Amino acid sequence: MQSAIPTYLSPGLVHGSNTSQRAIELKFLLPIDLAKQLKARARGELQFDPFADQVSGQYKVCSLYLDTRSYDIYHRTPATGGAKFRFRRYDDGRELFLERKLRQQGVVSKLRDPIPLDQLLQLSSLDSAIWSETQTFGLLPSCAVEYRREAFISEHSDVPFRVTIDNELSVHRFAQQGWSEFQDYLSGTHEAQLSSASRSLQPLEPNHCVVEFKFMDSLPVHLKRWVEDFQIAPIKFSKYRAAMKEFITSMEKSVGATL
């Protein structure tokens, strides 16, 4: 089924299905005002992602990241082969996607399995090769990153591509690396245990948006013009690492102080 995914919608998944093309993602961390200018340009020149609301162009994304107890994925140790693992939920969907994402020398490869929400809430046996891999590595819930995504496509250009603009990023770090809090988070009961949502979700990269250009093989001319016109430069940026950096640094300092 993954091989039928249109290139312009998910280059990483297309590459993961063993095509000869290289899936590339360029990331930009832009101030809100500059991101708004880029969004206005996108609205004028591109189409809304077909999965987005066709009035606002938006949808909600929740990425639930997994890691080992020693945070091997965060520390980029070879324990998991360099791959990242996460559950991804769109809006309030009753289905999540378990993803395995690998980036090597700038080329992105991503595999995903659909997982019904009810199976996760019951922790029943999941029929997924990716899930089996997470269990082999001993992966557990680490944090959740939520944001509103505005997505655009250029389906009919000579070189199709996709542009996403992620707004209002926030993070919830799981206090215990276990599945109970993960289940509560998905079912919404974590909010009932807190006086307000603001105590659960903390801002991530405030006053900034994460913009991504997603394409195959080489940067399309259309996007090259944007880079020049907006004078922007891609950076290495991971939502997961940004979400966990302060927490893990503080935790490791505390451990070091007790030794």
Image (cartoon, rainbow, N blue to C red):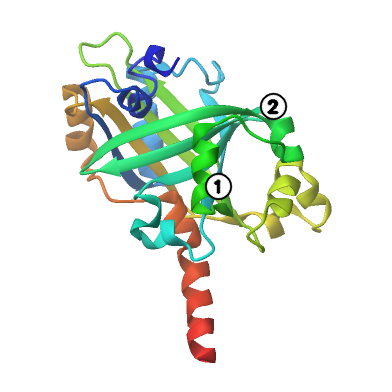
Crowd band around label 1 with a 10 angstrom C-alpha radius: few (<14), some (14–19), many (20+): few
Whether 61 is drawn above or below 67: the answer is above
Rounded to the nearest angstrom, the CA distance separating label 1 from label 2 is 23 Å
x, y percentage for residue 121?
74, 39
- Residue shown at 25% from the left, 43% from the top: 104
x, y percentage for residue 78?
34, 57
Whether 109 is drawn above or below 158: the answer is below
Horizontal side of 186 relative to 88 (left or right) equals right
- Residue shown at 34% from the left, 51% from the top: 237
- Residue shown at 48% from the left, 30% from the top: 112
x, y percentage for residue 122?
76, 38
Choose between 36 and 108: the one closer to the eye.
Answer: 108
- What secondary structure is marked by label 1? helix
Quadrant position of residue 194: bottom right
Q: What residue would you read off at disc 1?
A: 135
Horizontal side of 203 relative to 34 (left or right) equals right
- Residue shown at 35% from the left, 61% from the top: 77
Quadrant position of residue 56: top right
Amino acid of disc 2:
Arg
Q: Earlier in the sequence, mark 1 or mark 2?
A: 2
Q: What residue would you read off at disc 2?
A: 94
Nearer the observer: mark 1 or 2; the answer is 1
Amino acid of disc 1:
Gln
Choose between 235 and 106: the one closer to the eye.
Answer: 106
x, y percentage for residue 174?
64, 58
Look at the image and tell me whether residue 251 can be seen. Answer: yes
Whether 229 is drawn above or below 168: the answer is above
Look at the image and tell me whether residue 169 can be seen. Answer: no
Quadrant position of residue 108: top left
Q: Which mark is residue 245?
A: none
